[in-house]
Image (cartoon, rainbow, N blue to C red):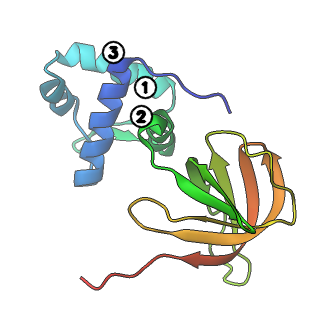
Amino acid sequence: MNPIELTPNQREVLSILVERYRDTESTVTGQYLADELDRSPSTVSKYTKELRSLNLVESIRGQKGGYRPTADAYRVLDTQDVEESESLYLVKGYDRLDVVVNAIEFPNVLDSESCKATIHFTDPIETHEVGDLILIGPTPGTNLALGGEIEAIESPTAFHIDVALLEAPVSAE
């Protein structure tokens, strides 16, 4: 998958769109974006058209129309925030690496007996092999810890894991 490079203006529009969509869980109007960006609606329309062509934004017509981000929009913003990301630990045996994880994907959470995950790293991890038992975490914010056996190495920056441990502290608020 080729990474999508956004211009600073595209990134700003997409960031505002995603933030507003997260807050309201409803479409974001072009007028809202224009007001937030202090730009004309036609300029915002140009940027959203570019973002639609990159499959980062969907345009919704009708009374409750506007724009909403696609799943790819979240991935692109997360990827471009790598320099601001916090490191996690990757542990094998007694060896501990300081790594940045771009994403943890769970392709199927319906089967409680067989939990799989794909871990995507920013930098290549070349010291691990299929069959190694590893532990990753804690993740920033949620303190998620994930452990299991490496089933496959998709690339130097992506492992498929048979998950044996998945823990996050529960807070009573």
- On screen, residue 119 versus residue 55, left or right, reads right
x then y, percent, for residue 12: 30, 27
Q: Secondary structure under badge 1?
A: helix
Residue picked out by circle 2: 57
- Give the quadrant of the C terminus: bottom left
Q: Separation of disc 2 and disc 3 at Cα?
A: 12 Å
Task: Identify residue type, mark 2.
Answer: Val
Q: Are marks 1 and 3 in contact (CB under 8 Å)?
A: no
> Which badge, 1 or 3, is on the more N-terminal residue?
3
> Which badge, 2 or 3, is on the more N-terminal residue?
3
Q: Secondary structure under badge 2?
A: strand
Find residue 7 and report its image quarter. Answer: top left
Residue picked out by circle 3: 46
Task: Identify residue type, mark 3.
Answer: Lys
Residue 13, disc: none
Q: Are marks 1 and 2 in contact (CB under 8 Å)?
A: yes
Residue 30 sits above or below residue 68 on the image: above
Q: Separation of disc 1 and disc 3 at Cα?
A: 9 Å
Q: Nearer the viewer, residue 158 or 71?
A: 158
Residue 32 sits above or below residue 152 on the image: above
> Which badge, 1 or 2, is on the more N-terminal residue?
1
Q: Nearer the viewer, residue 16 or 95?
A: 95
The 10 Å Cα crowd at callout 1, few under 14, some 14 to 19, many 20 or more, is many
- Name the residue at 38% across, 62% down: 141
Q: Separation of disc 1 and disc 2 at Cα?
A: 6 Å
Residue 51, disc: 1
x then y, percent, for residue 116: 71, 68
Residue 53 sits above or below residue 70 on the image: above
x then y, percent, for residue 27: 28, 44
